[in-house]
Image: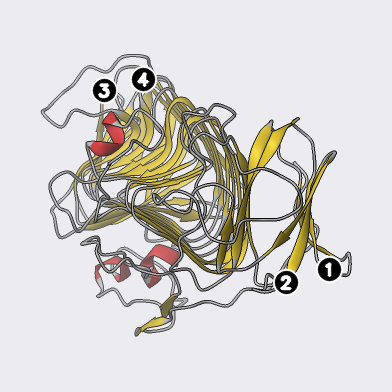
Amino acid sequence: MKRLKRMIPFLLVIMVFLGGCSSNSQTTTAESTAEAVTETTTVLSAVVSPTSTVVVDPEFTDRDLETSYDDGTAVQVTLDGSTIQVTGDGATASNGVLTITKEGTYVVTGNLSDGQIVVAAADTDKIQIVLNGATINCADNAPIYVKSANKVFITLAANTVNTLTDGSAYAQTDDNMVDGVIFSKADLTLNGEGTLNITANYKDAIVSKDDLVITGGTYTISAAKNGLSAKDAVKIKDGTITITAPNGKAITSQNDEDATKGYVYIAGGTINITNSNEGIEGTAIVVEGGTIDLISKDDGFNAASPGAAETESGGRGAGMEADSNAYLSIAGGTIFVNASGDGLDSNGNVYISGGTVEVSGPTNNGNGALDYNGTADVSGGTVVIAGSTGMAQSFSETSTQASLLYNLTSSCAAGTEIKLTDASGKTVVSYTPDKTYQSVVISTPDLAQGSTYTLICGSQTVEIPLTGMVTSNGQTGMGGPGQGQPQGGQKPQ
C-alpha cells in the first residue's frame, strides 16, 4: 500500500491531565510485587464521548512496565518433556501440571509436551511468570490458566523465543469455560523484550476476564477465533503484535454486565492484523499512538455495545438510533485499514483529532468506508477514506476541521491514486487504495473554507470549492445531501 506522501502535523483538541508518579526501575522480587503500585504520568489526548458511560483508563502502572526480576530469589521451573522440576517455594508439580499458589516470581524454561501452568493463588497475590525460552503444549486445555490471583504478569525474557499451543478441543475442568491458550480470570499483563508465538487451535489466543494489558514484547498470534480478548479492557502501550484471526476478531473488549467497561485503548506499539473477520472491536475504541495496519473481511474498527456488535449485519440502516455508549476516538498514531465491510464503524459517534488515517473500504454498496449512527467530528489529523458510494458518509457539520466527500461518476480501479491539489497545483494529500473505489472522503489541517481544490482520481478530475466546513455531493452524516455542492461539471451521485 502506498502511504501518504505528505505527513501533516496535527493539533490535539482536548488534553486531560491525569496525575501520577514517574516509573521506577527497582529490581522485581517476590517481595516487591506485594508493594503498593504507583501510576505512571499519563496524558489522555483523545476525545472522550460525553454521552458514553465507558470509563477509559489511559494509565499503565509501574508494575505493568517493569520487566526485571531477581533470578536468585525467584522460583526456578524447568520443563522436561512430560516432567516439571521446581526449585523454591510457592509452586508444586504433578502429572505435567505446575500449580502456583503463592505470590512471587517464577522463571520457566524448557519444553513441556502436554501440560500446563495453573495459577491458583489468593485474590491479593501478584504473580510474575517469566517465560525464559519455554515451549508449552496442552492438548485439551489452556497452556497457561489463571484461576485466581490479584494480578498476573507474564514477562518475556530478553532474547528468548517462547511458544504456546493447544489442541482443537478442550476438556473443561471447572465452570470457567476456558477458551484461550492464555486464559485468566484476573487482570493480566504481558511485557518484556522476548518473543511469544501462540497458535490457538481451539478458539482464542489470549483471554482475560478482567483487563488485558500489553506493554512490550514481540507476539505472533494465529487464532481459530479471537486474538486478544478481554471483558473489561484491552490496553496496549508498546510491543510488536501480529495477529491472524480469519474467523474472529483480532482485538476485542466488551462487557455485557458493566456499561462502564469494555474498551480498547491503544497508546503505542506496532499492530499488524494480517487477516481477520473483524479487526478491532469494543464498546469504545481509543487510539492515541502507534501504528495499526489491518485487513478485515468485515469491519476494520467497530465500536458497538455488546449484543449490537454481534447482531449488526453490516452497513447503516435507515432510522437506526445512535448507541450512546459506543464511540471511536483517534487522537494520534498511523492507521491503515483494508476492510471488506465498514472501514471505520461506530454505532455511536466518531471523533478524529489527530494522527494519520487511511481507509481502503468496501467495494459493495451495503457497507461504508466511514459508517456511524451518531456524529463524526474531525478536528485534526489527516484522513483519506475510499470506498463504495451506496452507504458513503462524510463528516458531520459540527466538525472544526474542513473536509470533503466526493462521489465520482464512475469507479476507479484498485491501485488508482487519489490526489488532491490546491490552487497552485501543490499536492495537499495523496493516497493509493488497495481496492476499487468510487467515493472519497478527505480531511487535513491544510483544507481551508473558501479555497478551491482539484481532486484527481485516474482519468477523473474535478474542481471542488470548499464553501462550508463540510463539502459534499453525497451524504453528510445521516442527513442527506450536504451543503456546498462541488463544481466542475460532475453530477451529484
SS for callout 4: loop
Which residue bears the numbered disc 3? 95
SS for callout 2: loop
Q: What is the spatial separation of the Cα atoms under label 4 and label 3, in whole angstroms?
A: 22 Å
Coloration of the structure image: secondary structure
In-front residue for pair 221/233: 233
Tell me if mark 1 has few (under 14), some (14-19) or many (20+) residues whose alpha carbon lies within 10 angstroms of its own: few
In-front residue for pair 166/126: 166
Q: Earlier in the sequence, mark 4 or mark 3?
A: 3
Q: Earlier in the sequence, mark 3 or mark 1?
A: 3
Q: Earlier in the sequence, mark 2 or mark 3?
A: 3
SS for callout 3: loop
Q: Earlier in the sequence, mark 1 or mark 2?
A: 1
- Quadrant containing the C terminus in the rendered view: top right
Q: What is the spatial separation of the Cα atoms under label 1 and label 4, in whole angstroms?
A: 57 Å
In-front residue for pair 33/57: 57
Which residue bears the numbered disc 4? 202
Tell me if mark 4 has few (under 14), some (14-19) or many (20+) residues whose alpha carbon lies within 10 angstroms of its own: many
Q: What is the spatial separation of the Cα atoms under label 2 and label 3, in whole angstroms?
A: 74 Å
Q: Earlier in the sequence, mark 1 or mark 4?
A: 4
